[in-house]
Amino acid sequence: MNIKFFLSDNDLAPTTISGKLYANALIKRGYDIEVVQKSNRKLDILNKLSCNMILFQKTFDKGHSYNEVRHLKGKVHLVYIDDDFLGMNDKNHIDTLNVADLILVGNKQHEALMHKYTKTPVETITSINDFENYRYIPFETRNNNPLIISWQQSLADVYISDLLSIKYPLINLHKEYGIRLQLYGWHEGKHYGKPDNRRFVSKYFPFAEFISFMPYDSYIKHIVPKIAMTDIFIVPYLDIPDRYGKAGFGLKRIMMLGVPVIVSDIGIHKEIIQDGVNGYIATTADEWYQKLKELITQSELRKKFSLTSRNLIDTKYSYDNCVNIFIDAIKKYIPDFK
């Protein structure tokens, strides 16, 4: 089977990084895959069909959407990896999903919600982990005084409401324990047409360090080692539809490093984190405060979360398991995907 894998030409996007991991995994398994990022090449393939299947990262890129692919329905298998829940009120987005043969999503909550929008089959997969670049850091190597709490988004400026939803726990814990706050992923107004929001956030967190976004190669070299030495990592997503499609890609990378995590109470987090076993799940501001305080004051608890987090990645989310889940999800509906 000849397969084309259409990725975004935006190499800054985490979904592009994730898509490349999927594509490389399939190539290693012997699948005939061509990774395509340039729009002209995509349009040429769509107009001169010479493959059996096209895998799409999202629906919004040129060469990915309804008007460009609808003529292929029934002629080639069309599979979309829908990485988030954005655009569900957009007719073109829904029309594109409806023309597909299969939609792959990152968590069960997303899968359940998708059935309200499309009759196309939906399967849950899991992101493939980059074991080469995210190596476990033993708990004992972290000796920060005061402790460091980190937060990260690939486009931090658009997630400030999530971060500020727990501003009072973080402010109070800084006053009590002097914790340092490292905030990663600021584009500084340079990309996506988004404003630089660091000054606004610094009004609440004058004690925070703001770390700029870096492209993946630089990120791996300069940022990952810095995050690896963090004592606690926080993921305070708001409970809103735009967050329901999150696939846990970033969270699992932090867990691979052995950094203890505390996360908000949304679908994907409840699939990955067992509260009190390999991390904490918090709902209210009081819960965020109390659970962060426990992690700050109990080094043995941080060590426990560090070890159990990495063990979960090495077992349930091992490289082979994640690849098998991806392949089996497609085979379920496209048996000739071999």
Image (cartoon, rainbow, N blue to C red):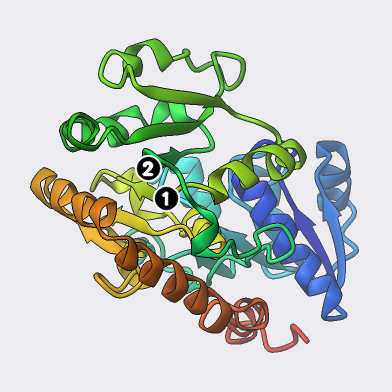
- Secondary element type, mark 1: loop
- Picture residue at 47% right of the left edge, 13% below the top: 196
Are the residues flagged by discs 1 and 2 in contact, CB closer than 8 Å? yes
Task: Residue at 70% x, 65% y: name it.
Answer: 22
- Graded by Cα atoms within 10 Å as few (under 14), some (14 to 19) or many (20 or more), the crowding at tag 1 reads many
Q: Which residue is mark 2?
A: 147
The three-letter code of the residue at mark 2 reads Leu
What's under tag 1, amino acid-wise? Asp
Residue 310: x and y in percent read: 51, 72
For the view shown, which residue lies furthest in the left direction? Answer: 286
Is 167 positioned to the left or the right of 34 in the image?
A: left
Picture layout, residue 238 above or below residue 337: above
Q: Position of residue 91 (x, y in %)?
A: 44, 42
The image quadrant where one finds the C terminus is bottom right
- Determine which quarter of the picture holds residue 131: bottom right
Q: Nearer the viewer, residue 4 or 66?
A: 4
Q: Is residue 199 above or below residue 250?
A: above
Crowd around label 2: few <14 · some 14–19 · many ≥20 (10 Å): some
Give 324 or 58, whichever is nearer the viewer.
324
The residue pinned by badge 1 equals 231
Q: Measure the C-alpha gap from mark 1 to mark 2.
A: 6 Å
6, 301: nearer the viewer:
301
Q: In percent of the image, x 53 and y 57: which residue is there?
A: 249
Residue 312 % position (x, y): 48, 77
Q: Secondary structure at mark 2?
A: loop
In the visual, does 197 lie left or right of 277? right
